[in-house]
Amino acid sequence: MYKRIFDFISSTFVFFAFLPIIVMLIMLVRIRLGSPVFFRQVRPGLDGQPFQIYKFRTMTSDRDGLGRLLPDLKRLTKFGQFLRSFSLDELPGLINVIKGEMSLVGPRPLLMEYLDRYTPEQARRHEMRPGITGWAQVNGRNAISWEEKFKLDVWYVDNQSLWLDMKILWMTLAKVFKRDGISHAGEATMTEFMGSPKGGE
Protein backbone atom coordinates (compact mmCIF):
# COMPACT_ATOMS: atom_id res chain seq x y z
CA MET A 1 0.00 0.00 0.00
CA TYR A 2 2.79 2.45 0.90
CA LYS A 3 4.35 1.94 -2.54
CA ARG A 4 1.11 2.93 -4.29
CA ILE A 5 0.69 6.00 -2.06
CA PHE A 6 4.29 7.04 -2.72
CA ASP A 7 3.81 6.51 -6.47
CA PHE A 8 0.61 8.53 -6.64
CA ILE A 9 1.84 11.50 -4.62
CA SER A 10 5.27 11.62 -6.28
CA SER A 11 4.08 11.13 -9.86
CA THR A 12 1.31 13.72 -9.46
CA PHE A 13 3.78 16.26 -8.09
CA VAL A 14 6.34 15.58 -10.85
CA PHE A 15 3.68 15.68 -13.57
CA PHE A 16 2.45 19.14 -12.61
CA ALA A 17 5.98 20.39 -11.90
CA PHE A 18 7.03 19.33 -15.40
CA LEU A 19 3.77 20.35 -17.08
CA PRO A 20 5.32 23.35 -18.90
CA ILE A 21 8.06 21.08 -20.27
CA ILE A 22 5.50 18.43 -21.24
CA VAL A 23 3.45 21.04 -23.13
CA MET A 24 6.59 22.30 -24.89
CA LEU A 25 7.56 18.75 -25.88
CA ILE A 26 4.07 18.12 -27.25
CA MET A 27 4.53 21.07 -29.58
CA LEU A 28 8.08 20.07 -30.56
CA VAL A 29 7.14 16.45 -31.29
CA ARG A 30 4.21 17.67 -33.38
CA ILE A 31 6.50 19.98 -35.38
CA ARG A 32 9.45 17.57 -35.73
CA LEU A 33 7.71 14.22 -36.10
CA GLY A 34 4.12 15.02 -36.90
CA SER A 35 1.01 13.33 -35.58
CA PRO A 36 0.33 11.37 -33.44
CA VAL A 37 2.42 13.03 -30.72
CA PHE A 38 2.11 10.12 -28.34
CA PHE A 39 3.25 6.54 -28.82
CA ARG A 40 0.60 4.24 -27.39
CA GLN A 41 0.90 0.47 -27.17
CA VAL A 42 -0.67 -2.34 -25.15
CA ARG A 43 1.79 -3.81 -22.67
CA PRO A 44 1.48 -6.40 -19.86
CA GLY A 45 1.12 -4.98 -16.37
CA LEU A 46 0.60 -6.53 -12.95
CA ASP A 47 -0.04 -10.29 -13.34
CA GLY A 48 0.36 -9.83 -17.09
CA GLN A 49 -2.89 -7.89 -17.44
CA PRO A 50 -2.83 -5.60 -20.51
CA PHE A 51 -2.86 -1.81 -20.30
CA GLN A 52 -1.99 1.00 -22.71
CA ILE A 53 1.37 2.65 -22.15
CA TYR A 54 2.01 6.30 -23.05
CA LYS A 55 5.28 7.76 -24.34
CA PHE A 56 6.32 10.62 -26.55
CA ARG A 57 6.78 9.54 -30.15
CA THR A 58 10.47 9.28 -31.14
CA MET A 59 10.32 7.68 -34.61
CA THR A 60 9.00 8.58 -38.05
CA SER A 61 6.49 6.43 -39.92
CA ASP A 62 8.79 5.90 -42.92
CA ARG A 63 8.09 2.75 -44.93
CA ASP A 64 9.80 0.83 -47.71
CA GLY A 65 8.50 0.31 -51.26
CA LEU A 66 6.22 -2.51 -50.06
CA GLY A 67 4.62 -0.38 -47.37
CA ARG A 68 6.46 -2.02 -44.47
CA LEU A 69 7.84 0.11 -41.66
CA LEU A 70 11.58 0.60 -41.89
CA PRO A 71 13.77 -0.81 -39.07
CA ASP A 72 13.67 1.20 -35.84
CA LEU A 73 17.26 2.38 -36.28
CA LYS A 74 16.36 4.03 -39.60
CA ARG A 75 13.21 5.67 -38.24
CA LEU A 76 14.76 7.03 -35.05
CA THR A 77 15.54 10.71 -35.65
CA LYS A 78 18.18 12.84 -33.92
CA PHE A 79 15.39 14.60 -32.07
CA GLY A 80 13.94 11.25 -31.04
CA GLN A 81 17.37 10.09 -29.90
CA PHE A 82 17.65 13.26 -27.81
CA LEU A 83 14.31 12.52 -26.13
CA ARG A 84 15.39 8.95 -25.39
CA SER A 85 18.88 9.83 -24.20
CA PHE A 86 17.43 12.04 -21.45
CA SER A 87 14.37 9.80 -20.92
CA LEU A 88 12.06 12.71 -21.82
CA ASP A 89 9.97 10.32 -23.92
CA GLU A 90 8.96 8.61 -20.66
CA LEU A 91 7.27 11.68 -19.13
CA PRO A 92 3.76 10.75 -20.39
CA GLY A 93 4.19 7.48 -18.48
CA LEU A 94 3.49 9.49 -15.32
CA ILE A 95 -0.16 9.29 -16.38
CA ASN A 96 0.08 5.48 -16.21
CA VAL A 97 1.51 5.78 -12.69
CA ILE A 98 -1.19 8.18 -11.55
CA LYS A 99 -3.84 5.78 -12.93
CA GLY A 100 -2.29 2.88 -11.03
CA GLU A 101 -1.26 0.91 -14.10
CA MET A 102 2.45 1.43 -13.48
CA SER A 103 4.82 2.29 -10.66
CA LEU A 104 7.69 4.74 -10.65
CA VAL A 105 10.01 1.79 -9.98
CA GLY A 106 9.53 -1.76 -11.19
CA PRO A 107 10.35 -4.13 -14.06
CA ARG A 108 9.93 -2.34 -17.39
CA PRO A 109 6.71 -3.24 -19.30
CA LEU A 110 7.75 -5.15 -22.41
CA LEU A 111 5.71 -6.60 -25.29
CA MET A 112 2.59 -8.76 -24.94
CA GLU A 113 4.06 -11.38 -27.27
CA TYR A 114 6.91 -11.97 -24.83
CA LEU A 115 4.58 -13.45 -22.20
CA ASP A 116 4.71 -16.95 -23.70
CA ARG A 117 8.49 -16.78 -24.10
CA TYR A 118 9.41 -16.35 -20.44
CA THR A 119 10.58 -19.16 -18.22
CA PRO A 120 8.47 -19.54 -15.04
CA GLU A 121 11.19 -17.69 -13.10
CA GLN A 122 11.38 -14.83 -15.61
CA ALA A 123 7.58 -14.51 -15.59
CA ARG A 124 7.78 -13.55 -11.89
CA ARG A 125 8.70 -10.05 -13.06
CA HIS A 126 4.94 -9.55 -13.46
CA GLU A 127 4.28 -10.10 -9.76
CA MET A 128 4.64 -6.32 -9.38
CA ARG A 129 3.42 -3.33 -11.36
CA PRO A 130 5.83 -2.39 -14.16
CA GLY A 131 7.90 0.73 -13.65
CA ILE A 132 9.11 3.79 -15.52
CA THR A 133 12.54 2.86 -14.22
CA GLY A 134 13.86 -0.24 -12.48
CA TRP A 135 16.75 -2.19 -11.03
CA ALA A 136 17.72 -3.51 -14.47
CA GLN A 137 17.68 0.02 -15.91
CA VAL A 138 20.21 1.33 -13.40
CA ASN A 139 22.37 -1.78 -13.85
CA GLY A 140 22.86 -1.73 -17.58
CA ARG A 141 19.58 -0.60 -19.18
CA ASN A 142 19.67 -1.83 -22.81
CA ALA A 143 23.38 -2.68 -22.80
CA ILE A 144 22.94 -6.01 -20.97
CA SER A 145 21.44 -9.29 -22.18
CA TRP A 146 17.78 -10.21 -21.73
CA GLU A 147 18.70 -12.99 -19.29
CA GLU A 148 20.70 -10.57 -17.12
CA LYS A 149 17.88 -8.05 -17.25
CA PHE A 150 15.27 -10.59 -16.14
CA LYS A 151 17.43 -11.81 -13.25
CA LEU A 152 17.69 -8.22 -12.05
CA ASP A 153 13.91 -7.78 -12.41
CA VAL A 154 13.16 -10.86 -10.32
CA TRP A 155 15.75 -9.80 -7.72
CA TYR A 156 13.88 -6.51 -7.40
CA VAL A 157 10.55 -8.32 -6.96
CA ASP A 158 12.05 -10.30 -4.06
CA ASN A 159 13.82 -7.34 -2.43
CA GLN A 160 11.58 -4.32 -3.06
CA SER A 161 11.50 -1.67 -0.35
CA LEU A 162 10.93 2.08 -0.13
CA TRP A 163 14.64 2.56 0.52
CA LEU A 164 15.54 0.54 -2.58
CA ASP A 165 13.05 2.52 -4.67
CA MET A 166 14.59 5.79 -3.51
CA LYS A 167 18.05 4.46 -4.35
CA ILE A 168 16.92 3.40 -7.85
CA LEU A 169 15.31 6.79 -8.52
CA TRP A 170 18.52 8.55 -7.49
CA MET A 171 20.63 6.21 -9.63
CA THR A 172 18.23 6.77 -12.54
CA LEU A 173 18.89 10.52 -12.44
CA ALA A 174 22.62 9.85 -12.54
CA LYS A 175 22.21 7.44 -15.46
CA VAL A 176 20.10 9.94 -17.39
CA PHE A 177 22.75 12.64 -17.11
CA LYS A 178 25.50 10.17 -18.06
CA ARG A 179 23.29 8.81 -20.88
CA ASP A 180 24.44 5.22 -20.16
CA GLY A 181 23.10 2.07 -21.85
CA ILE A 182 20.54 3.82 -24.06
CA SER A 183 20.62 1.14 -26.72
CA HIS A 184 21.92 -2.34 -27.42
CA ALA A 185 24.87 -2.54 -29.84
CA GLY A 186 23.66 -1.94 -33.39
CA GLU A 187 20.03 -1.41 -32.34
CA ALA A 188 17.79 1.58 -31.68
CA THR A 189 16.91 0.10 -28.28
CA MET A 190 17.10 -3.66 -27.68
CA THR A 191 16.93 -6.74 -29.88
CA GLU A 192 13.71 -8.74 -29.80
CA PHE A 193 13.46 -11.29 -27.00
CA MET A 194 12.95 -14.71 -28.60
CA GLY A 195 13.08 -16.75 -25.39
CA SER A 196 15.88 -18.08 -23.22
CA PRO A 197 17.89 -21.18 -24.14
CA LYS A 198 16.17 -24.42 -23.14
CA GLY A 199 16.53 -24.97 -19.42
CA GLY A 200 17.60 -21.38 -18.82
CA GLU A 201 16.21 -19.42 -15.93
Image: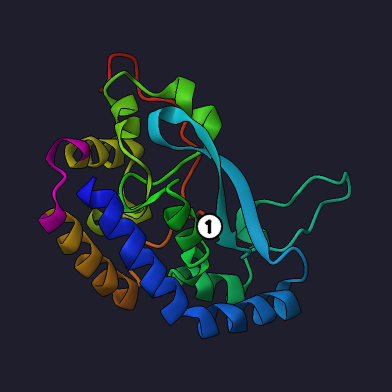
Q: Observer-nearest residue: 86 or 41?
A: 41
Q: Is residue 155 left or right of residue 141?
A: left
Secondary structure beneath dot 1 equals loop
Q: Position of residue 181 (x, y in %)?
A: 34, 61
**Residue 187 position (above or below residue 119):** below
Q: How many marks?
A: 1
Residue beneath the point at 53% across and 39% down = 43
Q: Observer-nearest residue: 187 or 84?
A: 84
Q: Quadrant of the N terminus?
A: top left
Label 1: few (<14), some (14–19) or many (≥20) C-alpha neighbours in 10 Å: some
Residue beneath the point at 78% across and 59% down = 62
Q: Is residue 87 left or right of residue 144?
A: right
Q: Observer-nearest residue: 51 or 39?
A: 51
Q: Quadrant of the C terminus?
A: top left
**Which residue has dot 1 on it?**
188
Mainly helix, strand or loop, the magenta region? helix
Report the span colored magenta.
157-163
Residue 158 is inside the magenta segment: yes
